[in-house]
């Protein structure tokens, strides 16, 4: 008899989601798919299944190498799951990271009045005041 485990429990065990309830919620929202069909959190998975998880802006794809019900250390996850995400998806992720890193440093909040005035001067072409 081939063993299987609930998809939400497995995704939590291999550390793809922080909690089991978050994994279950992702299944309910249709973010977790198998064979291009969204699946319920109670779906049983087996070795060899391919799981796709929509994590905007990309879709990550994993192959199940072994099943586990108990949460494991991060070093053990490669024995249970293999990332087979398409290279074009990974390239899209890198482009999104680069796009978000340009501009203001993270955590600085909204531009100040001085920042806004400087931006307006640049847009008008007034280079002498810099």
Image (tube, rainbow, N blue to C red):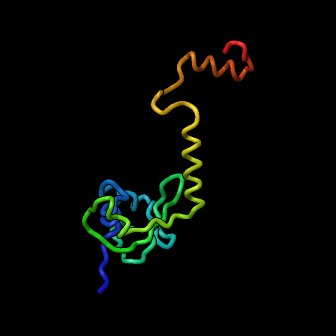
Q: Is residue 114 left or right of residue 53?
A: right
Rendering coords of residue 92 (x, y %): 59, 53
Q: Is residue 113 above or below residue 14?
A: above
Write the residue at 51% across / 60% down. Answer: 59
Q: Residue furthest front?
A: 75
Q: How many tags in the picture?
A: 0
Q: Quadrant of the C terminus?
A: top right
Write the residue at 49% across / 73% down. Answer: 35
Q: Residue furthest top?
A: 129
Q: Is residue 127 left or right of residue 27?
A: right
Q: Residue furthest left?
A: 70
Q: Residue furthest right?
A: 125
Write the residue at 34% across / 74% down. Answer: 66
Write the residue at 57% across / 16% down. Answer: 114
Q: Quadrant of residue 17?
A: bottom left
Q: Quadrant of residue 90?
A: bottom right
Q: Is residue 8 visible?
A: no
Rendering coords of residue 111 (x, y %): 54, 23
Q: Is residue 127 above or below residue 47?
A: above
Rendering coords of residue 81 (x, y %): 39, 68
Q: Is residue 15 visible?
A: yes
Given residues 75 and 127, the one toward you in this image is 75
Q: Is residue 96 left or right of residue 68?
A: right
Given residues 60 and 42, the one toward you in this image is 60
Given residues 89 and 42, the one toward you in this image is 89
Rendering coords of residue 31 (x, y %): 45, 60
Given residues 121 and 90, the one toward you in this image is 90
Q: Quadrant of the N terminus?
A: bottom left
């Amino acid at each position: 008899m081939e063993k299987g485990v609930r998809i939400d429990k497995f995704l939590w065990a291999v550390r793809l989601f922080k909690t089991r309830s978050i994994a279950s919620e992702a299944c309910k929202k249709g973010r977790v798919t198998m064979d291009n069909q969204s699946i319920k959190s109670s779906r049983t998975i087996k070795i060899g299944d391919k799981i796709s998880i929509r994590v905007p802006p990309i879709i990550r794809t994993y192959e199940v190498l072994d099943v586990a019900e108990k949460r494991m250390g991060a070093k053990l996850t490669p024995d249970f799951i293999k990332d087979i995400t398409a290279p074009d998806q990974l390239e899209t992720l890198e482009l999104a990271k680069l796009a978000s890193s340009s501009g203001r440093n993270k955590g600085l909040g909204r531009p100040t009045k001085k920042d806004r005035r400087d931006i307006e001067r640049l847009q008008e072409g007034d280079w002498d005041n810099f």
